[in-house]
Image (tube, rainbow, N blue to C red):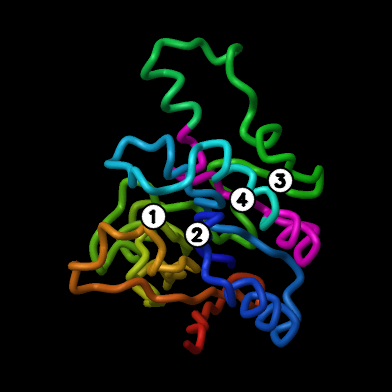
Amino acid sequence: MIADTHLPFVHPGYLDFCNDIYKRVKCKKVVHIGDLVDNHAINYHEHDPDGKSPQDEMQEADKQLKQWFKAFPNVYLCRGNHDRMVDRKGKTVGLPSRALRPFRDIWNLPKSWIDDFSFIINDVVFQHGTGYSGDNAHLNAATRNRQSTVIGHIHHLSAMSYTASERDCIFGMAVGCGINRRTYAFAYGREMPKKPVLSCGVVTDNGLYAQVFKMPL
């Protein structure tokens, strides 16, 4: 699983890291857990007045996307809360859905990139994790779904845990992120004690096992 990339504010080494894990583990399917793009210039939070304009940010993200499309031609993409920013802004100003372009058209996603809010692959749920928070978010998501679950969304959380009952044993995994926390888009986190963990995740043996891989920095 590729973690939150927040293009164009991704760590410059994260693509190569994910590609290395993909080849080393010989992955058969690739899931991007969401927040493919950041949309900092149009989000609801305070903007950096010295930052890129919406147009410049999108053009920079487009350049980076071409590299990701080439490295990973077939991807299941979970749409994250930042990916939905255009739709959310449209609703804020009262625009009907027909007035807005679909997410995949805005970013020219290849046909082999399948986007949706969540996927179930080998009985494992893959979802961005919007609405979850805290250090046990991955387990809470698995418990809520009542099956093994992988989430992103929480940048400081890179972990895998099992939880068992009389009926079954399932896992919850959080895959951290791939962001460059030194960029202005993440200036809000500079005083926060919990820092982003750059990592990705792998699910093996038809959904039985999961592992997170931390990116060396």
Percent across and percent down for residue 125 are: 52, 56
Rendered image: mark on residue 42 = none
Inter-mark Cα distance, 3 to 1: 27 Å
Alpha-carbon neighbours of circle 4 within 10 Å: few (<14), some, or many (≥20)? many
Give me the residue at 50% from left, 30% from top: 86
Disc 1: which residue: 185
Sooner in the amino-acid sequence: mark 3 or mark 1: 3
Disc 3: which residue: 114
Badge 2 amino acid: Phe
Specify whether residue 67 is painted magenta: yes
Element on which disc 3 rests: strand
Q: Is residue 215 above or below residue 90?
A: below
Specify whether residue 4 is painted magenta: no
Inter-mark Cα distance, 4 to 1: 13 Å
Q: How many marks are shown on the rendered structure?
A: 4
Disc 2: which residue: 9
Element on which disc 2 rests: loop
Badge 3 amino acid: Ile
Sooner in the amino-acid sequence: mark 4 or mark 1: 4
Sooner in the amino-acid sequence: mark 4 or mark 2: 2
Disc 4: which residue: 61
Cβ–Cβ under 8 Å for marks 3 and 1: no
Give me the residue at 54% from left, 74% from top: 201
Mark 4 or mark 3, whichever is nearer to me: 4
Inter-mark Cα distance, 4 to 2: 8 Å
Inter-mark Cα distance, 4 to 3: 19 Å
Give me the residue at 68% from left, 37% from top: 104
Cβ–Cβ under 8 Å for marks 1 and 2: yes
Residue 173 in view (yes/no): no
